[in-house]
Image (cartoon, rainbow, N blue to C red):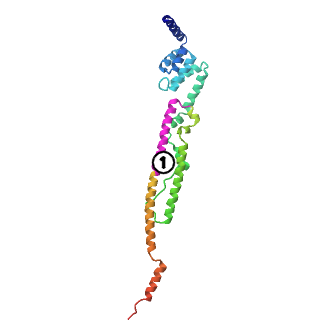
Amino acid sequence: MKRLLLVASLLSASAAHADPLSAAHALFAKKSYPEALQLYTKLGNAGNVEAQQRLGEMYLYGEAGAVDEARAEAWFRKAAAKGNAVAVASLELIKQRSARRAEILHWVEQYQGEDLKSGKFNCAVPRIPTISKQAADIERVSASVTGWQNCYNDYVTNLNAASPLVKRIPADIAKLMNQAETTRAATRLAQVQENLAEEARVSSKLVLADLAAWRSATEAYVKEHNAIVGKAPSEERARDIEARKSNYAPPRN
């Protein structure tokens, strides 16, 4: 039995040695990337077209370590020169990535949600005074706050509907991004959305605090003013009182 096992082991090793490309594929499938890279490189240098194509993919997608598009392109060119269709398509992909590098970086590193808080969603903070003593000013403040509240509610609704923000990456850009870029973009855009939501919450609290202080001060003034006006005699009443006083004026000597 032991001898049979030894023979089977030797046959297996011989088969692997006879088909190094299959062995490289098997290593890649097991995610043994360093070993697969070593074997693919040996085969690629020997002129194996499929190995050259696989090497290009490993360098392009970071399976050979860090992403290295220069090395990826070099291997793809070798395979494409021999008619490998995957290599030809991959070279076109690299060309498009180069042409649209700035757009890719915009979503990976720079996007701040500008489009989500512009236009009709650019909610101007209302100017709320400490107190209003005129009816016209009270109406102005009330109208301004109502407009801001409507805008704020629409903004929050739109922000929630935009979640997750990776949906805003144009499809033609998303398909050019590698896995590392896609992951970075998703993580960063989730943080951008949280920042926008927190910014909205803080802004809302400040406006509502100012509104509460204004309303309290204004209502206190109106109440006091009405009380004073209620106690004061009207102009007609004052004239009547003066007339009655003259009727009872003491006679002159």
Q: Which amino acid does label 1 sit on?
A: Ala
In this orientation, which residue lies closer to the viewer: 70 or 186? 186
Residue 66, compared with residue 23, is above or below; it is below
Q: Tell me if residue 18 comes above or below residue 102 in the rendering.
A: above
In the structure shown, which secondary structural element does the residue marked by tag 1 occupy?
helix
| Residue most extreme to the front | 1
Q: Where is residue 73 in the image (x, y as percent from the top left)?
A: 54, 24
Q: Vertically, is 177 above or below 150?
A: above
Figure check: 87 above or below 123: above
Residue depicted at x 49% and y 62%? 138
Give the residues drawn in magenta, as a range: 176-204
Q: Residue furthest top?
A: 3
Can the viewer see residue 115?
A: no
Is-magenta flag for residue 103? no
Neighbor class of circle 1 (other Cα within 10 Å; few <14, some 14-19, many 20+) is some
The answer to whether one can see residue 202 in this image is yes
| Predominant SS along the magenta part | helix
- Total numbered labels placed on residues in the image: 1
Front residue of 152/95: it is 152
Q: Position of residue 56 (x, y in %)?
A: 54, 22
Q: Where is residue 199 in the image (x, y as percent from the top left)?
A: 46, 46
Residue 120 image position (x, y, % from top left): 55, 50
Residue 203 falls within the magenta-colored stretch:
yes
Residue drawn at (57%, 18%), measured in percent from left and top?
Answer: 50
Residue visible at 59% across and 23% down in the picture: 86
Q: Residue furthest left?
A: 253
Q: Name the residue under label 1.
A: 200
2, 109: nearer the viewer: 2
Quarter of the figure with residue 175: top right
Q: Quadrant of the C terminus?
A: bottom left
Relative placement, left or right, of 239 versus 90 is: left
